[in-house]
Image (spheres, helix red, strand yellow):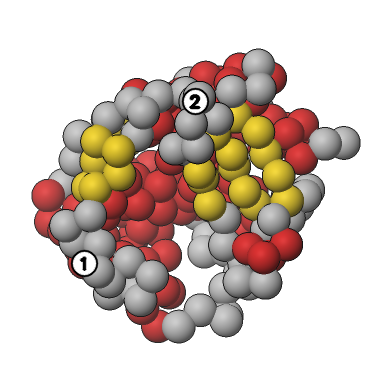
Amino acid sequence: MTVEQNVINVLNEDIVHRINFQFASVRISGNDYEVIVRAIRHRHITCQHNTILASVGAGAYAHDLGNHCNVLNLPFANPQSVQEKALVIHECTHAIEDYHGVSLPLLVSEGAAFLAQMMYAFLATDGGFPSGDAGLDPNEMGVFITAHNIARRILTTRGGYIVRPDEQLSLQNAIGSVNLYGRSRIHRVEYNGI
């Protein structure tokens, strides 16, 4: 199967439709991922295995390549583990943000993506914390723990989907403490639509 089809398979999993939250101005629901499936099928988003990213275990959504060319770069061709599938959700959440074509503070964009990632992980493990992240430094692990705690609260609270301001601040601070994002407190992501 192609990388695109493997990503579509993850996005079509039933639990993806249970992702539902609002983080600051970013509203994400499971149905939003269907838009990304259509964008991939219509080649508005291409998916590729990026061996450079594989060396660091990260993904990247490139949204500003001109002519509405958008690329979902993943460190694997066929996501198998909960962590790999959750990373697909993270990067596709950035694609949803791009679909809406809004300018967002980077920490808000990343906060929403990490929360979606950990909602998927929570649902896929029946509330557990996915194993396999032992190589993370304490600040990186703090992002996942904070996002997981918010995901647990939202998913176990009847009618709860809004991230509280204290939770939002806590997750943004955790993300800002990671070297990759440390200088990003004022940076904005200028999403331009798919």
Q: Quadrant of the N terminus?
A: top right
Amino acid type at image mark 1? Asn
Q: Position of residue 76 (x, y in %)?
A: 73, 55
Residue at 63% across / 63% down in the picture?
53
Q: Nearer the viewer, residue 9 or 188?
A: 188
Q: Residues within 10 Å of mark 2 (few under 14, many from 20)?
A: few
Task: Using the image, determine if residue 93 lies above or below residue 141.
Answer: above
Mark number, residue 68? 2
Density class for disc 1 (Cα within 10 Å; few <14, some 14-19, many ≥20) is: some
Query: Horizontally, is 17 left or right of 29 in the view?
Result: right
Q: Is residue 116 visible?
A: yes
Residue ID at (76%, 40%): 3
Q: Is residue 94 left or right of residue 76?
A: left
Q: Which residue is mark 1?
A: 173
Give the residue displayed 61% in from the left and 71% down from the top.
Answer: 56
> What kind of residue is marked 2?
His
Does any portion of residue 126 appear in the rendered image?
Answer: no
Query: 105 or 9: which is nearer to us?
Result: 105
Q: Earlier in the sequence, mark 1 or mark 2?
A: 2
Q: Nearer the viewer, residue 1 or 185?
A: 185
Residue 120 point in image, percent of width and height? 52, 46
Closest to the observer: 119 or 109? 109
